[in-house]
Image (tube, rainbow, N blue to C red):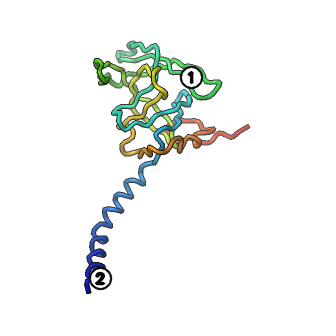
Amino acid sequence: MMKRDVSISLFIVLVMLSPFSRASAYLEDQKIIAGWVEDIILSPAQIRFRAKLDTGAKTSSIHAKNVEEFERDGQSWVRFTLPKGLEKKSQARTVELPVARETLIKRHKLDSARRYVVELGFCMNSNYYETEFTLADRDNYIYPVLLGRRFLENKVIVDPGVTHKHSKKLKNIICYPGFPEPVLEE
């Protein structure tokens, strides 16, 4: 009799929890699982970079040199140089973009730093994304791109035991708004 009561209780608990498990699975299905390091292709420059997916950072960041603000049509713009990418023939590129905003970055044991924020598009996992990036000198870091929580939330679950889960999917694609299409090898 006791075994039957336990079975009935367990059945009731499972029935009560099933909507929650389905909702949880549904939400997780909308996100990709990625390694803590992935390759991305920056659009429209088509430069391939290695990116660290960092749940400890709020805002994404990209390595930028020679950052200078200027005005265009009454709006604040910024000119900066991106480093060369992963490809052997890749070269550093100068980019001009409108300033989305400015932010103060907290730094451990240092004064806060003011940084420009721009919106950039990129491809990862054969998908096109847009997010805000702070422009920073990342010479002292291994990875020129850092993808922070503002980008990761609702899109990516980071597996800390994996790297380059999706990097191979970027081979021979052209990254643009919409889904990238494969480029036929010649």
Residue found farthest to the right:
186
- The tag earlier along the polypeptide, 1 or 2, is 2
Q: Nearer the viewer, residue 53 or 91?
A: 53
Query: Which quadrant of the view contains residue 99?
Result: top left
On the image, the x and y values in percent for residue 101 come to: 32, 24
For the N terminus, the quadrant is bottom left
Structural crowding at the residue carrying mark 2, measured as other residues with C-alpha within 10 Å and reported as few (<14), some (14–19) or many (≥20): few
Give amino acid for label 1.
Answer: Lys
In the picture shown, does residue 162 fall above or below 145? below
In the displayed structure, does residue 144 sit left or right of residue 172? left
Structural crowding at the residue carrying mark 1, measured as other residues with C-alpha within 10 Å and reported as few (<14), some (14–19) or many (≥20): some
| Residue drawn where x is 29% and y is 82% of the image | 3
Give amino acid for label 2.
Answer: Lys
Q: Secondary structure at mark 2?
A: helix
Q: Nearer the viewer, residue 58 or 9?
A: 9
| Residue drawn where x is 62% and y is 42% of the image | 182
On the image, the x and y values in percent for residue 76 come to: 36, 17
- Which residue is denoted by mark 2 in the rendering? 3
| Residue drawn where x is 27% and y is 71% of the image | 13
Residue found farthest to the front:
2
Q: Secondary structure at mark 1?
A: loop
On the image, the x and y values in percent for residue 19 come to: 31, 65
Q: Nearer the viewer, mark 1 or mark 2?
A: 2
For the C terminus, the quadrant is top right
- Which residue is denoted by mark 1 in the rendering? 84
